[in-house]
Amino acid sequence: MSALFDVVVAGAGPGGIATATVAAEAGLRVCVVDGNVAAGGQIWRGHTADKDGSLAGRWLARLHAAGCTVWQGANVVAAPAERVLRVEGAEGVRDVEWGKLILAAGARERFLPFPGWTLPGVMGVGAAQAFLKAGLEVNERRAVVAGSGPLLLAVAAGLHGKGAKVAAVCEQAPLARLMKFGAGLWRHPEKLIEGLQYQVGAGFAPYRAGCWVVRAEGRERVERVVLTDGRRQWSVACDLLACGFHLVPNLELALLLGCEVEDGVVRVDARQMSSLEEVFCVGEMTGVGGVGKALVEGEIAGWAVVGNAQRVAASQRERVKQMEFARRLDEAFALREELKKLPRPETLVCRCEDVVHKALCTRAGWRDAKLHTRAGMGACQGRVCGAAAEFLFGWEVRDKRPPLFPASVLAMAADVEEGKS
């Protein structure tokens, strides 16, 4: 079956929620499509609607009250025609036609391969956060949190709050860069307070800058992790390692539609409109910057689609402030060159297709690697190994072929217009 909406929002994180709410409150017919079981994205996972509660609760309450059509557990798998998205979920396959389209697909964490990264007990920091919110039992478990980005402290606090013993928090960025970043947080006092709260919440676990994982070791699961500061190495006993290297915007749908991408993000104007007419992008897709940036961009896009130029203009100062924070975030947590030397020849890079590092070293680029090794052709469609390959080899990974997610044959082959099969 097919449906027609004034506005379709792809993604129900903070940015998508803000856009959908503003547009729906103005009387437009809005549909939100999201792959998760509930709105909120990764950052607001587990929050419920509460108009008098947290920021997340208030926005979720507004979204529900606005009367949007929300399709949860549904992924956009293709764009079979102009201004049409094909969606597959628990209720089957549907085509949705849009007058204006807002892309709010968010970001995913970047994994970088190192020896032992596939051992049981090793997971991404974002995965650890999601598992904790879902009830993962970590009481008395020894944990190390490593990699790069502000999420490290948040996850360390979450682990400590659930009873884990956080042995170390290891940030690969050098201390000088972190201090420079911290000195600029006077412009964002709420973020400084949030960081201090996470440090307290983590039980003041040892925090080391300029420190990264060399390898994880263990027989049947991780038992210890070897760390380095570039001068010496040491091991820390643990049975849980949460490791991730900041975030990567989810650009697959934007690339499929033909949006222009610059420096790894979608290029947008002051209204959040992409290079394509009536296609807007908000949140991490335009630069990783957190909830504040996603919300103001979502509101701007919402006011833009309803034609409220005055409200769009009034939000530009906050938008500029949030974009500057995103720029400084990228600068502070830029990855060091030493991380490219971590994989051994036999270290897996593509877990879906069991492709090791040495098989990729002789390839000329991402397409060549896919053709000869099947890297990026498994269930995740290159979302994990593609970002790693970009960093490790300097390749441009810009896949834009449907399906964007694993899909049924019906989703890709059937005519799902009303009355046809």
Image (cartoon, grey):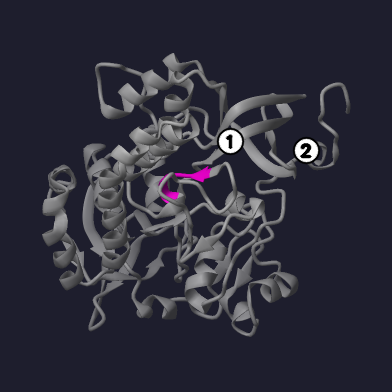
Note whether residue 235 is visible: yes
Question: Is 256 positioned to the left or the right of 421 in the image?
Answer: left
Label drawn at residue 199: none
Note whether residue 237 is visible: no
- In this view of the protein, which residue sits in the foreground, 117 or 361? 361
User: In the rendered image, which quarter is residue 17 located in?
Assistant: top left
Q: Position of residue 184 (x, y in %)?
A: 14, 59
Question: Is 133 positioned to the left or the right of 390 in the image?
Answer: left
From the viewer's perspective, is residue 370 above or below residue 26?
below
Question: Is 20 positioned to the left or the right of 339 in the image?
Answer: right
- In this view of the protein, which residue sits in the foreground, 17 or 137? 17
**Quadrant of the drawing holding the N terminus:** top right
Label drawn at residue 411: 2
Which mark lies nearer to you, 2 or 1? Answer: 1
Q: Position of residue 338 (x, y in %)?
A: 36, 80
From which residue to which does the magenta span run? 280-284
User: In the rendered image, which quarter is residue 40 located in?
Assistant: top left
User: In the rendered image, which quarter is residue 14 located in?
Assistant: top left
Under circle 2, the secondary element is helix
Under circle 1, the secondary element is strand
From the viewer's perspective, is residue 411 above or below residue 92?
below
**Quadrant of the drawing holding the C terminus:** top right
Task: Tell me which label, 2 or 1, sits earlier in the chain.
Answer: 1
- In this view of the protein, which residue sits in the foreground, 247 or 7? 7
What kind of residue is marked 1? Lys
Name the residue at 69% across, 31% down.
Answer: 97
Q: Residues within 10 Å of mark 2 (few under 14, many from 20)?
A: many
Name the residue at 33% across, 40% down.
Answer: 313
Give the spatial CA distance, label 2 vs label 1. Answer: 23 Å
Q: Position of residue 26 (x, y in %)?
A: 45, 20
Label drawn at residue 100: 1
Q: Position of residue 405 (x, y in %)?
A: 65, 46
